[in-house]
Image (cartoon, rainbow, N blue to C red):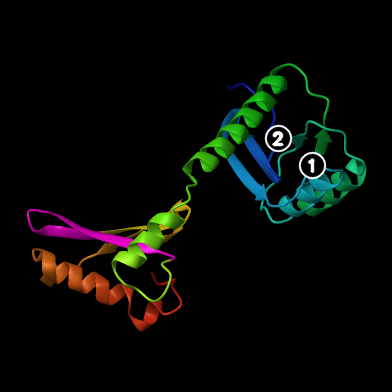
Amino acid sequence: IAGYDKDRDAISISNIRGETRIGVTSVRGGWIVSHKNFLQRNLKLNEGLLESFLSSYYTTEDTCPEMILVNEDLLDRNSIQRSLSEYHKKKILITNKIRNRDIGLMKISKSNTDLYFKKIKKEKKDLSQIFSLIKTRLDLKKDIDLIESYDISHFSGKNALAGKVAFNKEGKAKDQYRIYNISKKNSANDIGSMKEVIERRFSRKNINFKNP
């Protein structure tokens, strides 16, 4: 969708099993440029949630569009408008009167929020039994909370890289994924490259990094 005359954000809310996700779809320069999702755990849809989000989100952002679209009436809309206008030094309108092209924008925002919600739910798995089985097979004393795997790749012995993936009891732990550049002296040596990356991973510099 393109052709908007003013920058604007569309705010949508989804709630599944006690988890509330707020989506922000942004239009800049006439085009939809981004969609962000924010998870509010252990919260149900209630009065004040959207007001609280608007006040906190747009006072931590460097910019704010002239128009913010919401799909419900706000009890304190005028106060929030006034506060954000003063903070960003321009007039900002918050409205739930959705018309014309903005109806499609709100649908896109809601659809993107719901889709991301379903994707996150689908990716979550319970690997507790597998972790417990590995612990038993390896005769480990402590429970396994994190498993890391490393691989070395290079192009004809040059530009070697090491990749790390990680899994916790809920599945892929993508926030733990890493890529390491390998030094030239070990670039053509897979064993040397692996030794290097393991030493770097568990060095004192990474002492506060979660260990498997």
Instruction: Say which residue appears at 31% left-offset and 72% top-offset.
Output: 139
Q: Is residue 161 magenta?
A: yes
Q: Which residue in the protein does label 2 denote?
A: 12
Q: Which image quadrant: the C terminus? A: bottom left
* 121 to the left or right of 200: right
Instruction: Say which residue appears at 43% left-offset and 70% top-offset.
Output: 143
Total residue callouts: 2
- Work out whether residue 187 or residue 170 is closer to the camera in this orientation and state it: 170
Q: Which image quadrant: the N terminus? A: top right
Magenta residue span: 145-162
Instruction: Say which residue appears at 55% left-offset and 37% top-offset.
Output: 116
Q: How would you rate the neighbour count of disc 2 (Cα within 10 Å): few for under 14, some for 14-19, many for 20 or more?
A: many
Residue type for callout 2: Ser
- Work out whether residue 142 or residue 116 is closer to the camera in this orientation and state it: 142
* 47 to the left or right of 53: right
- Work out whether residue 161 or residue 142 is closer to the camera in this orientation and state it: 142
